[in-house]
Amino acid sequence: MLDRAAVGLHRGYVERTVCEPTVRGRIDLPAHTRAAWKHPGLFDQLVDDLSPDVPANRWPKSAATELARTPGLSAGTREALDRAISAFAGVGDDPVPAADRDAIRAGAPAGYRELLDWCGLLDDGQVLVSLERAFEGYATRLFRAAVGERNLRVQQPIHLTPVALTPDLVVRRGDTPVSVWDAKWKRPAPAADDLHQALAYAALLGVADCGLVYPGRRFRLETLRAAGSAVAVHLLRLPLTDDPARLRRTAVRLRRACRPCRRGA
């Protein structure tokens, strides 16, 4: 939520009822007729304001507000939630009906998918976390910091009629893919199926570099090559940390590691 607020909350036109001395919307004639004697010189009217108070913002705010009421949170977690809620100060407090959430997620603006996916993990006051999904999000943030938003495609389907294959991360330069990566929440010992998957992505995208991303204690990059093949399979371990300084160092090392993968660009 803080990252989203720093970039700028999505805004949409919201109809509001106001009572003002100048007309800037549609006169609410019934309301104005009933109350004109109470405030002469003012006009009851309906205006369309460009506001952050839209469903894509109300859902995260209501989810964070509900989570903040959970007993047993650490002081640091509660303080972070308070800052996130404050960052959405211009957003209403009304909760989003559960029946509307799929439609909100489907129509969400660019940059909201991950945030709304996290909101979807909240159910009846309990947080159900998929560690695999969480690691995919962690790897995505590090790759985004390393290569930049415009050079990264996240879970972009490769259509292979009648099915579609979806790699987690594709690093691009302009319109040209240069490497493809898939995050794996498991021990860093690639199974044959994982290697087949990575090589299939590389063949479909026409890139010479593919990789499998694993959690680890330290940053480590290994490369596998088959004799006579131009395709390299990279085995990448990303250290799990929430320390900002270590995250920055990891992003720098990841940027350097991605440079050899750009030889085809």
Image (tube, helix red, strand yellow):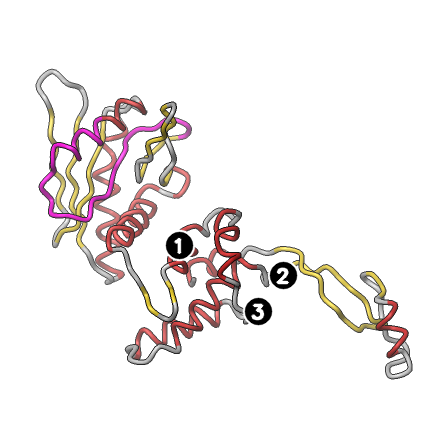
Q: Which residue is mark 3?
A: 92
Q: Is residue 213 left or right of residue 13?
A: left
Secondary structure beneath label 1: helix
Residue 51 is labelled as 2
Q: Residue at x 17, y 27 (%)?
A: 232
Percent x, y of residue 23:
85, 65
Mark nearest the camera among 3 and 2 is 3
Q: Taking the image as drawn, is residue 152 in sight?
A: no
Percent x, y of residue 225:
11, 25
Q: Residue flagged by tag 2: what amino acid is it?
A: Ser
Secondary structure beneath label 3: loop
248 or 186, nearer to the observer: 186
Q: Residue furthest top?
A: 228
Quadrant assignment for the C terminus? top left
Neighbor class of circle 1 (other Cα within 10 Å; few <14, some 14-19, many 20+) is: few
Percent x, y of residue 204:
30, 23
Mark nearest the camera among 2 and 1 is 1
> Distance of mark 2 from mark 1, alpha carbons?
23 Å
Q: Which residue is mark 1?
A: 117
Q: Quadrant of residue 181?
A: top left
Q: Is residue 59 left or right of residue 126?
A: right
Q: Quadrant of residue 165?
A: top left
Secondary structure beneath label 2: strand
Q: Residue flagged by tag 1: what amino acid is it?
A: Asp
Q: Residue at x 86, y 79 (%)?
A: 35
Q: Residue flagged by tag 3: what amino acid is it?
A: Gly
Q: Is residue 141 left or right of residue 110?
A: left
Residues rendered magenta in the picture: 174-199
Q: Residue at x 32, y 25 (%)?
A: 205
